[in-house]
Image (cartoon, helix red, strand yellow):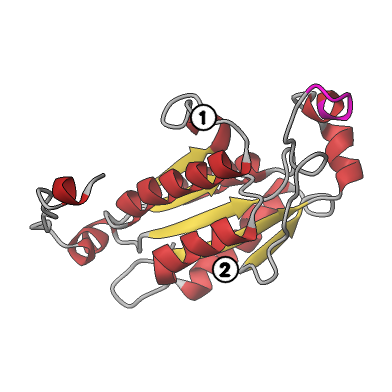
Amino acid sequence: MTESQAANITFHRPHVSRQDKERLLGQKGMLLWFTGMSAAGKSTIAHALESELFSRGRMTVVLDGDNVRHGLNKDLGFSKADREENIRRISEVAKLFVENGLIVMTAFISPYLADRDRVRSYMGGDFVEIYVKCPMEELERRDPKGIYKKARAGAIDDFTGITAPYEEPPCPELTLDTSLMPVRECVKGLMNYLDSHYNRADMVKL
């Protein structure tokens, strides 16, 4: 966007505030950012958590890495620059939902620490980083899409954990080791965290 184009854009403030929407929904808008290697269980846990939150009357949305790449980000590849843009776009979409009072869960490998730190800075106190951890041996044993096998054979370029790096979160809010914890236990841990950190006087318990 050029400087002259930017000069013709005006940011419109909503008439209904975020606080009013949160009060109506009885919840606090937040972003739960699931990061981890392919097949670690990010999407599985995010959707299981969504089911639990839905059963409690919460309004949620899950943004899944593969699903988003079929639409919004279908023009992006897997180079470092494209991965950065992928995360930038997702953070913008997530912020729109959060500012309207929704609980957003994103399931993206998001391998680079700098990209996740930018999202944390952008989202402020609405950001919860959840590291879905799993040893490489277990990931390759699971390999539900057969992509680790393809990557090992050299059929996939820039594959995280094999030909591209994954930078582990140094200080995530939560770490879920799916080689040790079943999905139900992961969801229980997440609910305990949310109930203890996001229970405000004017909100019902999550």
Disc 1 is placed on an element classified as: loop
Q: Amino acid at mark 1?
A: Arg
Q: Name the N-terminal-most of marks 1 and 2.
A: 1
Residue under the point 80% across and 21% down? 155
Tag shown at residue 193 = 2
The reply to whether dot 1 and dot 2 touch (C-beta < 8 Å) is no
Displayed quadrant of residue 27: bottom left
Assess disc 1: are there few (<14), some (14-19) or many (≥20) residues with their C-alpha within 10 Å of its C-alpha: some
Q: Nearer the viewer, mark 1 or mark 2?
A: 1
Q: Which residue is mark 1?
A: 69
Of 49 and 70, nearer the camera is: 70
Q: From the image, which quarter does the N terminus lie in?
A: top left
Foreground residue among 77 and 169:
77
Quadrant of residue 163 within the rendered picture: top right
Total numbered labels placed on residues in the image = 2
Residue at 45% of width from left, 57% of height from top?
31
Image x and y of residue 68, in percent: 48, 32
Judged left or right of residue 155, residue 174 is left
Q: Name the residue at 57% across, 68% down.
A: 193
Q: Residue 76, how many percent across, how many down? A: 52, 31
Between residue 122 and residue 178, name the one nearer to us: 122
Three-letter code, disc 2: Tyr
Q: Is residue 6 magenta?
A: no
The residue at the point 26 percent across, 61 percent down is 22
